[in-house]
Image (cartoon, helix red, strand yellow):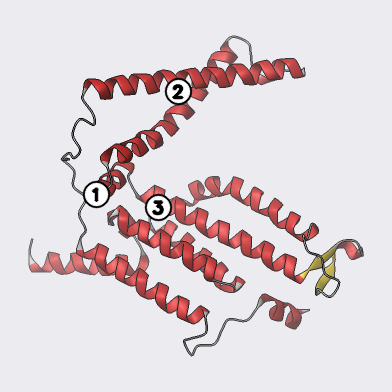
């Protein structure tokens, strides 16, 4: 490779470190796991809703820049949004520790028995953004990390390969189980046993039990076949084993971990007020200024 090509490659890596474009795909899975751990701790340390919203936006931008389509992101977040919105509503109207001295922002529909309290709204929104950030970061990890690479990187950390391969088989079986469930559903529909014909509780119970029993039998059969195949190949006879694929730490992994640790330390010092920077305003103060 010429010096000009090396310079262009270095510039692409520098741009990747800044924007996150395709960097997550090239990193060692352990580096991304460290990033997830630091992000999780930092998310729970934050108290400001504005900072939590900003962190959520950053994670979404990293996902989009890591070649994760926006439509797929919406499909995966659809169920989460539904659960989080219900949780937020329940936190608002079923405050576990009501206090007469607690600040009431407003009354919903001007009804005195539907107060929207400041503390309940704060904890509801905080839980909303924490779960949203953790879920989207997990999607970022799973969509940019191959299961096989993750297992080989765990083996490099001296974790017994039996546990690593058990984890890989469990993860690999998830789409297989989904496909088996679809096949069983089509077979039941071909025999005239579908949801359209269920009109009584007894038929619904029979439909669900047959579906679950069919899936369970299929899973057990595949698990038994896998165990026989592993025994025939003498899997686990040696305490250690070599692999054709070796996942190594590269310079970009050390740089990425250093950047993550630096940002984590600086962010933690900023949250606890050690750094001489102004803290973000609260949403309550913005609410008072607007209303």
Front position among marks 1 and 3: 1
Given contact means CB atoms under 8 Å apart, are the residues at marks 1 and 3 in contact?
no
Gap in angstroms between the C-alphas marked 3 and 2: 27 Å
Given the current orientation, which residue lies at the most extreme bottom position?
276
Q: Position of residue 86 (x, y in %)?
A: 71, 51
Residue drawn at x 34%, y 49% as measured from the top left: 145
Q: Position of residue 271 (x, y in %)?
A: 52, 78
Of label 1 and label 3, which has the lower sequence position? 3
Whether residue 118 sits left or right of residue 135 in the image: it is: right
Question: Which residue position is annotated with label 2?
Answer: 219
Residue 58 in view, yes or no? no
Whether residue 158 sits left or right of residue 21 in the image: it is: left
Viewer-closest of 250 and 196: 250
Q: Position of residue 97 (x, y in %)?
A: 78, 64
- Total marks shown come to 3
The tag on residue 202 is: none
98 vs 80: above or below: below
Front position among marks 3 and 2: 2
């Amino acid at each position: 490779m010429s010096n000009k090509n090396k310079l262009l490659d270095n510039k692409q890596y520098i741009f990747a470190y800044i924007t996150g474009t395709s960097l997550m795909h090239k990193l060692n899975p352990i580096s991304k796991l460290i990033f997830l751990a630091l992000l999780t701790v930092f998310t729970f340390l934050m108290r400001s809703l504005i900072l939590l919203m900003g962190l959520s936006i950053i994670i979404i931008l990293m996902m989009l820049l890591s070649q994760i389509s926006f439509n797929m992101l919406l499909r995966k977040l659809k169920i989460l949004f539904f659960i989080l919105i219900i949780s937020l509503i329940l936190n608002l109207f079923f405050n576990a520790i009501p206090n007469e001295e607690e600040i009431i922002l407003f009354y919903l529909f001007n009804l005195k028995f539907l107060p929207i309290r400041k503390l309940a709204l704060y904890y509801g929104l905080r839980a909303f953004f924490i779960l949203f950030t953790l879920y989207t970061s997990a999607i970022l990890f799973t969509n940019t990390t191959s299961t096989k690479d993750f297992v080989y990187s765990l083996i490099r950390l001296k974790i017994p390969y039996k546990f690593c391969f058990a984890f890989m088989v469990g993860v690999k079986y998830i789409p297989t189980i989904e496909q088996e469930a679809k096949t069983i559903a089509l077979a039941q529909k071909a025999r005239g046993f579908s949801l359209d014909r269920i009109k009584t509780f007894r038929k619904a119970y029979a439909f669900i039990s047959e579906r679950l029993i069919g899936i369970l039998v299929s899973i057990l059969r595949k698990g038994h076949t896998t165990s026989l195949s592993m025994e025939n190949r003498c899997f686990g006879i040696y305490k250690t084993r070599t692999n054709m694929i070796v996942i190594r730490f590269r310079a970009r992994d050390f740089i990425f971990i250093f950047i993550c640790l630096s940002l984590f330390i600086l962010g933690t010092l900023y949250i606890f007020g050690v750094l001489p920077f102004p803290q973000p305003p609260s949403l309550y103060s913005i609410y008072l200024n607007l209303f």
